[in-house]
Amino acid sequence: MAKATIKSKTGALITIDGSEKEISSILSVFETTTAVGQAKRAVAKSKAVEKEEKKRSSVSDLIIDLKENGFFEKPKSLADISGALEEMGALYPTTSLSGIVLGLVKKRFLSRKKIDGRWAYGK
């Protein structure tokens, strides 16, 4: 009678007693299920990475990116900001930007001043 010992990933030792054919069969099943488990974990990990990459940036993040790229060197209106976002592929109406930009002003990411009776935003 043949004997084989397998060490699992968890550290458990499995001892198998039987004919060479029986042991060979059990080892092939064990190796197959281990490979399938590894493949499933790899697929799940790649899906998690894809999901993380697909997350959209918030409007605030996009506006901060504009600031970091020098967009606000000169004061800009909400319409200018909306146009720049549109060029980036993010369509936001000017009316929805006012609260977001004001929030960035309050957090001191942007500044604002009144020019000709309208608010303009800068760095």
Image (cartoon, rainbow, N blue to C red):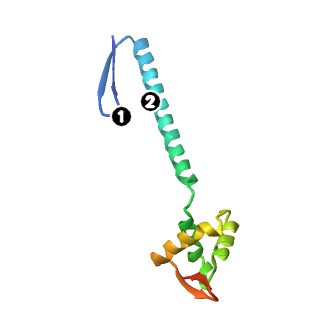
- Label 2 vs label 1: CA separation? 9 Å
Left or right side of 27 for 82:
right
Could you tell me which residue is drawn at 64 percent across and 70 percent down? Answer: 94
Of the pair 70 and 33, the residue shown nearer to us: 70
- Where residue 81 appears, x then y in whole percent? 64, 74
21, above or below 73, in the image: above
Of the pair 115 and 59, the residue shown nearer to us: 115
104, above or below 75, in the image: above
Q: Earlier in the sequence, mark 2 or mark 1?
A: 1
Q: Which quadrant holds the N terminus?
A: top left
Q: Amino acid at mark 2?
A: Thr
Could you tell me which residue is drawn at 46 percent across and 76 percent down? Answer: 106
* Total residue callouts: 2
Q: Amino acid at mark 1?
A: Lys
Report if the CB atoms under discs 2 and 1 are less than 8 Å apart: yes
Single out the residue that lies furthest toward the front. 117
- Where residue 6 appears, x then y in whole percent? 34, 26
Single out the residue that lies furthest toward the bottom. 116
Name the disc covering residue 66, or none.
none
- Where residue 120 appears, x then y in whole percent? 60, 83
Name the disc covering residue 34, or none.
2
Could you tell me which residue is drawn at 58 percent across and 67 percent down? Answer: 62
Q: Quadrant of residue 112?
A: bottom right
Badge 1 element: loop
Of the pair 50 and 55, the residue shown nearer to us: 55
Could you tell me which residue is drawn at 53 percent across and 39 percent down? Answer: 43
- Where residue 24 appears, x then y in whole percent? 43, 17
Q: Quadrant of residue 4?
A: top left
Name the disc covering residue 9, or none.
1
